[in-house]
Amino acid sequence: MLVSYNWLQDFIDLDQDPKALAEKITRTGVEIADVDHPEEGLKKIVVGKVLDCEDVEGTHLHLTHVDVGEEEPLQIVCGAPNVAAGQLVIVALHGARIAGNEKIKKGKIRGIESYGMICGLQEIGFADSVVPEEFADGIYVFPEDAEVKPGQDVYEALGMDDYILDFDITPNRADTLSMEGVAYEVGAIVNQNPKIEEVVLKEDGPDWTNELDAEVDAKLAPKYYLRKVSGVKIAPSPLWMQRRLWNAGIRPINNIVDITNYVMLLTGQPMHAYDARSFKSGKLVVRKAEKGEKLTLLNDKEVELDPNDIIITNGETPVMMAGVMGGLNSEVEDDTTDVILESAVFDGTLVRKAALRHANRTEASSRFEKGINWDNTEKAINMAAILLRNEAEGTVDEGLIKATDTKREPAVVKTSVAHINGVLGTELKNSEVVALLDRLNFDVEENNGELTITIPNRRWDISIPADIVEEVGRLYGYDNLKSTQPLLAETHGGYSPEETAIRRIKNIVEGQGLMEAISYSLTSPEQAVRYTMDPKPLVQVEMPLNSSRSAMRENLMTGLVDAASYNMARKEKQLHFFEQGRVYDHENDTFNEHEHLATLYAGDTFNENWQHENRKIDFYFVKGQLENLFDAIGLDENKIVYKAAEIDGMHPTRTAAIYLDKEYIGMIGMVAHAVTLADKSLRGSELYGYEIDLDVIIKHLTKGLKSKPAPKYPAISRDLSILINKKLTNAQVENVIKANSGKYLKELRVIDVYEGAHIEMGKKSIAYNLTFLNEKDTLTDDVVNKAMSKITESLENELEAIIR
C-alpha cells in the first residue's frame, strides 16, 4: 500500500525524516520497499493562467499567453487539444526540469517563439494509471475550487511535496491496508496514540428502508449494510481528495466513486455505490451465481459467472460480482441522482477465487481475501454518506438496512511475562511488557506476571501466545535482543559409515568414466517393478499428477533407460550413465527405502579413434566394470556368483542374477529388445547395465584394496586349453581350477573360447592363462608342474574335461 506521509500526520504528530521513519518501520516488521518524493528532481514548475488562446493556422498548435506571476505574461506554443483561455494550468518555465530530468528551454516552434511549456500530469512524473481520464491526452487543468494562483509552485497543490511510503505488506498484516491501520502501527512504533475520529451521522431525509427488500445469505456475507443518499450531483471530486487518491495509486473518476475509494483507503473497508435506478424492482439478493449467467463489469469486460462466484442481483439479473467489481448496468452515471451505498464483509476465500478465476484482481478483492476489520463496516458507510452530503450535495435518507449483522467477538489471548522472556531471551519486567502492549492499544490485564489480553478486531492476525511474543519482540526492538548461543546437544560433523561407503562407491564408478544421472522417484506402476528380480508391493501415490507418476520406483534402471531415450533422440549414442539413489516398497505393510546403484551403457567401449579400434559394449565389458568395482571396495570375488535369470525388462539369455554368500545383491545384463523396440529413440540400440543393492553390499565391505611394493620374485605363466561340455559355465571351471591350484595361483583369465565345426558337437574349447607367484621366494617349475597336474586331473574327474 502507498501511504502518504502528509496524510499520516493527520493521525500522528510526526517530526522525523520520512526515510528515517521508514527504516524504523521496517525494523519492526513491516517492510517499506521504497520512499518516493514526487517533487524530487523537478524545478521551476509553477501555476499559470491562460490569458488567451489562438489556433496556429494549418497546425494542431495553439498560441497562448500565460500569466505566471511575472510582470509580463509568457508566450507559449501548446499542442494540447484541451487548452483554452481562462484555465489554471501547469507551466514549466525556461530552465525547468520535468520528469526524466528533461530540461525545458525557450525556443521556436513553427517559427513562433515559445518561452516555456504547458504540461500534462504525465510530463511532471505522474503515472498514466492515476491521471484523470479527462486529462489523459492533454494538459492538466486545475479545478475552479483549487486555491492556487499564478506563479505559485505546483508541488503542494498537486501533493508532490509529499513523501510516499510503499508498505510491502505480507498477507498476515493486512490490517495495515488502511490509513487508520497504518496509524495504529506507526503510532505503536513512535509511542503515540493515533487520533482516530468517530463518525457521527445526522440523517436529513425521509425513511427509505421500505423501498428495498434485501435477501442475503449470511454464509456469503456475514455483514451487509445498505444506505441511501438522494439528490447527489455528479462532478469531479475536490482537489484535496484527488491528491490523496493519486498519491495512493488510484485514478480519480468522479465525486461518488472517489468517495468510496477514499473511505476504503481510510478505513480499509471496501465500498460500492449503485445507481438506485438499478433496483427499481425493490429487491436486492446476495447469492451464488447460476451456471450460464453473465455480467459486464465496469471495465467493459464481460464474464461468464461461475457457480461459486458471489453476486449481487436486483432479483432478476446480476449487478455486481461481490467483493471484486461492480456491473456496468448499475454504474453511477452523469445523470444519476440517487445512490445506494454498500458496506459488507464477504467470504474472503470465494472472493479470492473469483478474482483469480476471472483475472480481475482489484483493490477491494485484495482486502477481502486477506481480511478486513468487521468493526468498520458501519463506520465506513456512515462516513461515505457524510462525504456525499458535503461533496456531492446529497441528502442522507433515514435508515440503515442491516441485511446481515453477524458479530465478531474480540479474541482473548492468555500468556505470561515469563513465557515471553523465555522465548525472546529478554529480562523484561511486567510493567515493561504491559507498556509495550498498551502502545498497540490492546486491553491488558496483568496479575503476578500472568497476562490476559483482549485483541481488537482490527488485529485479526493475533490469536495465540506466539503472536503476542512477536508483537512484544518487534516493539522492544530486534536489535535490542541479546545474541546468545543456543543450548543444544553437541553434534559431530561428518558422514555416517553408510554415507561414507556410498560416496566411496560413487567415486569409483565415476572414475570408471560414468556420468551421474538423477531421475524421478515417481513412475508408472508397470515401470516401477520392471528390471526387478522379486517385485514387492508398490508404494502408491494417493493423488498423482498423472498415471506415469503414480508409484514410487523399485529400481533405478527405469530412470536410466528414460535418460538413454532422451539422449538418443538427440543423436547422443555413446552413453555411460550411473545413478545412485533410493528405491521404495511396501513390504510387510511398512514403507521401506533401500539404497541402490545402477549403471547403463550403450555404444562403444571407447570413442572413435584414428586407429579405428572400436569395440561394441557387451555383457562381458559391463561385467568386467562391475568386477573391478567389487575388487576396489574389497568384496571377496570367491563369494560372488552369477546365475542366469529371467527378469522382466531384461534379455532372457543375456541376464544374470548376482549373489554374495548366496544372498541376492542385484542383476546384470542387457535391456530386452521388447523395451527398446517400443521406444522409437532406442530402436536398433543395445543397452547393457547392472543394478546392485548397496544396503546388502555395505554389510560385506572391507577396507578395500591396499597398495604394496612390486614383487621381488618372478612369476610363472602357463596356458591351459580344455574341451568341455557346452552347458558348463566358465564359473564352474574356474572354481575347480582355483580349488586345486594351491596357494601360489595369482591370476586366472580366459584367453580364448571356441565353438564350431572343428570340435565335437555339444562341446566348447576354452583356453586359460594361469599366473603363479610366490612373493617370498623364487617359485620353481616343480611346484608349478605339480599344481598344473592336480588342476588337469581335477578337471578330468569332476567336469569330464579333455586336456588339449
Image (spheres, rainbow, N blue to C red):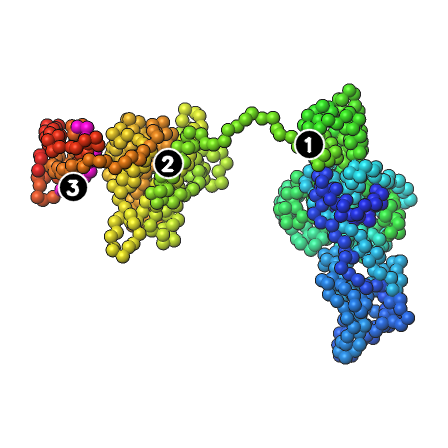
Q: Which region of the structure is painted magenta?
A: 742-755
Report if residue 409 is visible in the image.
no
The x, y position of residue 521, in whole percent, is 44, 38
Looking at the figure, which quarter contains the C terminus? top left
Determine which residue is flagged by label 3: 753
Q: Which mark is residue 617?
A: none
- Choose the circle earlier in sequence order: 2 or 1: 1
In the picture, residue 651 is in which quadrant?
A: top left
Determine which residue is flagged by label 1: 482
Q: Nearer the viewer, residue 641 or 549?
A: 641
Q: Main secondary structure of the magenta part?
A: strand
Alpha carbon separation for disc pair 1 and 3:
79 Å
Determine which residue is flagged by label 2: 505
Secondary element type, mark 1 = loop
427 with respect to 622 (left or right): right
Report crowding for label 3: few under 14, some 14 to 19, many 20 or more residues within 10 A (C-alpha): few
Q: Is residue 201 above or below residue 410?
A: below
